[in-house]
Amino acid sequence: MTSQKQATSIRLRYHADLQYDVRSPGCDFIFNVQAARTGQQHVVSEKLEISQPVQPQYFVDPATNSRYLRLRADEGPLRVYCETVVDLLLHRAPAASLPEVPVAQLPAGTLPYLYPSRYCQSDRLHRFAFAQFGGLQQGYGRVQAIRDWVRSHVDFVSNSSDGNTSAVDTLVTKQGVCRDFAHLMIALCRAVNIPARFATGIDYGADPALGPPDFHAYVEAFVGDGWFMFDPSGTAIPMGFIRLATGRDAADCAFASIFGSVEWKSPLIGIEPIAGADGVRRMPEHCDDALSTDAAERL
């Protein structure tokens, strides 16, 4: 990033209400619904309610700051409710100021996001990606071009994919939901040697025509000296994304992993901007700047 960096501060409040009917005794759950604590994402307050008298365990992935809640539930109803207020300090930089980083100069922590993964088979898309994007000028603009290509060639169709749908499948069918858009963009970025990772979160600004609020999947690509957000599905406002988890693909970032027999209801999600510490309510908005999820001390 350059001396032209700026920061935008926004306070958001979200809730996630998860309800299950546990059909087997001793059913194990691993949840990832709590906001990650990072240099630019500060958890102001958090309320977590679990309907059963269980002994939850909490742990944090030191590499990604993803927070995990593990519990064993008894037969019967189970409700997990999380309500959180988050301050976002969004780093902004002119898109033209962000170059791609040669592989030899990439920070070690970015290297796992160059490789193929379960849902992002970049090795199978190498030839296609170089034919489409290999001749473009390198930098943030090339990542934008990949995002725009995915957005214009894939249709958002609810319930058009499942847990087995990969980036290659999405390229063939040309339809999917947010996680499918993200997997395809990630695979194409990696195929041209740009580190890219999968992110899950709560998003503000989604079109109500797409259905009730839900968890969202988007992309973070490493350009310049940090990770920058991209939303290939184009369904929400990146300035209003609260990060829950990051990983190689959706296999690393499920909001709930269940080990046992369970019936579940669709999660009830809500998010809204609220007044910050200064009393000002700032609304997320679309902007032309690149938005970074790097730590605040990089400014």
Image (cartoon, rainbow, N blue to C red):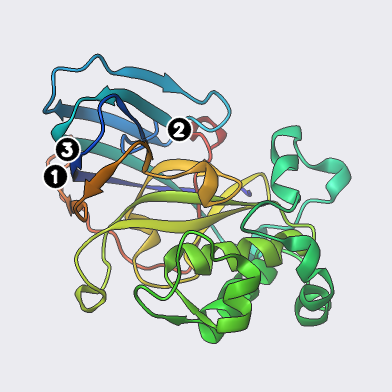
Give me the disc on residue 66: 2
To which residue does mark 1 refer?
275
Marks 1 and 2, the one that precedes in the sequence: 2
Q: Is residue 298 left or right of residue 177?
A: right
User: What is the CA distance from the residue labelled 3 to the residue labelled 1?
Assistant: 7 Å
Q: Which of label 1 and label 2 is nearer to you? A: 2
Left or right: 217 as drawn, with respect to 172: left
The answer to whether the residue labelled 3 contacts the one labelled 1, judged by CB atoms less than 8 Å apart, is yes
Residue located 45% across and 70% down the image: 161
**Residue 149 appears left or right of 32:** right
In the rendered view, tell whether residue 229 sits above or below residue 257: below
Q: Which badge, 3 or 2, is on the more N-terminal residue?
A: 2
What residue would you read off at disc 3? 278
Comparing marks 3 and 2, which lies closer to the viewer? 2
Residue lying furthest top: 55
Q: Does 4 appear above or below 65?
A: below
Task: Say which amino acid is labelled 3.
Answer: Asp
* Circle 3 or circle 1, nearest the eye: 1
